[in-house]
Amino acid sequence: MSTPVVLVAGGTGFVGRRLVRDLADDGRDVRVMTRRPGDHDGPGTPVGGDVSRPDSLEEAFDGVTAAYYLVHSLGSSDFEARDAAAARAFGEAAAAAGVRQIIYLGGLGDDDDDLSAHLRSRREVESLLGAAGVPVTVLRAGIIVGHGGISWEMTRQLVEHLPAMVTPRWVRTRTQPIAIADVVRYLIGVLDNPDAVGRTFEIGGPEVLAYVDMLKRVAAIEGRALPVVQVPLLSPGLSSRWLALVTDVDVRAGRTLVDSMVNEVVVRDPSIRDVLPFETTGYDDAVRTALDERRESG
Ligand SMILES: NC(=O)c1ccc[n+]([C@@H]2O[C@H](COP(=O)([O-])OP(=O)(O)OC[C@H]3O[C@@H](n4cnc5c(N)ncnc54)[C@H](OP(=O)(O)O)[C@@H]3O)[C@@H](O)[C@H]2O)c1
C-alpha cells in the first residue's frame, strides 16, 4: 500500500513553510501546493495548484488522504468573493479525491460581535470547505507571533519605526497572541486525530493582552521607550495609510487588518486543551524567538 499523502495548500506561506518542515521531519509524505511549484526549494514535493482555478486542483489531490488549507487573498479588493469561491472549489476537489480530513487555520472572534469583513470571510470559509462532505477541523487563531507573519510584522515595525505610539481606539481591544511554534504543534496534533476530525477549536497563547500592551512589551524587550499618545478618533482609513507609511505592510492588507482590530480575538472555548494538552509559549518568549529568527535570517 502506498504511503498516505498530506497536501498543504499554502505550504509556501508564513505558517505553511514551518508546518511542511515539521511534517516532513515527522516522516510524512508532504505535498506542497503552490501557484509557482518551480520556485519551491524547501522540504516536501511541490505541486502546482491555484484555488481560483478549480481544474488545477485534481492533480494536486491525487492520492491525498488529508489536506491543510492555509490560503487567503487578504491583499485583493474582492477577497470575500475570492476566498468563498476558492474554499468551495477546494472542498469539492477534496471530496472527489476521497480526502478524509481537511484542516483549516481560520480567525478568532465572536459570532455575536459585529465581525469585520475579514473575520466574517474567514468564518464563511470554515463551512464552505466542508460543504461537499469532507469533515473539516478548524483551528481559529488571533495574532500569530513569528518572523514573517503579517500581524507580527505590523507590531514589530510599528514599535521600531515610531518615536511615539499614536493610538486610535482599537489599541484597547483585547487579543490572545500565540507563538507560531504552538500553532504548528496544534496543526500537526489534529492531523488524523479522531478526537479532532470535524471539530472547531479556538487556540491562543497563555496571555490575553490589549494591542497597546503587546506594543509596549515588544518595546521593552527591544529596550525602546515608547510614549503612548492617545488619538481616539483616528479613522481606519487613516490608520491603514499611516501603517503603510511606517511599515512595509501592503495598504490594502493593512486596511483589512486594521478594520478587524475593533473585534476582540480571545479564546472562549478552551476544549483544544483536552485534546492536545501542552503549555503554550508566553508572549515575551514568542517575541524573543521571532526577533532571533529575524536576526538569523539576516
Ligand atoms: N499570519 C497570521 O497572523 C494569522 C493569524 C490567524 C490566522 N491565520 C491564517 O493562517 C492561514 C495562513 O496564513 P499565512 O499568514 O501563512 O499566509 P501567507 O504567508 O500570506 O501565505 C499565503 C499562502 O496562500 C497561498 N495562496 C494564495 N493564493 C493562492 C491561490 N490562488 N492558489 C493557491 N495558493 C494560494 C500562497 O501560495 P503561493 O503564493 O506559493 O501560491 C501562500 O502559500 C490563513 O488561513 C490565515 O487566515 C494567519
Image (cartoon, grey):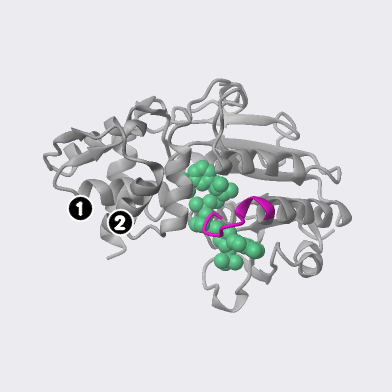
Residue 166 vs residue 87, the one in the foreground: 166
Q: Which mark is residue 218?
A: none
- Residue at 48 percent across and 36 percent down: it is 142
Q: Give the distance between the C-alpha atoms of the residues marked 1 and 2, in whole angstroms.
A: 8 Å
Residue 22 shows in this picture: no
Quarter of the rendered structure image containing ligand 1: bottom right
- At 42% from the left edge and 51% from the top edge, which residue is drawn? 254
Residue 110 occupies quadrant: top right
Along the line of sight, the residue nearer the viewer: 63 or 258: 258
Residue nearer the viewer, 88 or 148: 88
Q: Residue at x 30, y 56 (%)?
A: 247
Q: Please give the range of residues in magenta.
A: 74-81
What residue is shown at x 44% (from left), y 32% (from top)? 262
Q: Amino acid at mark 2?
A: Thr
Mark toward the start of the polypeptide (1 vs 2): 1
* Disc marking residue 247: 2
Disc 1 is placed on an element classified as: helix
Describe residue 257's horizontal placement relative to residue 23 as left or right.
Answer: left
Q: Is residue 155 magenta?
A: no
Q: Tell me residue 130's x, y (percent).
A: 79, 42
- Quarter residue 97 falls in: bottom right
Q: Does mark 1 have its CB less than 8 Å from ligand 1?
A: no
| Percent x, y of residue 136 | 74, 40
In-front residue for pair 152/100: 152
On the image, the x and y values in percent for residue 156 come to: 28, 48
- 1 and 2 marks in contact (CB < 8 Å): yes
Left or right side of 154 for 12: right
Check disc 1 and report the residue beneath it.
161
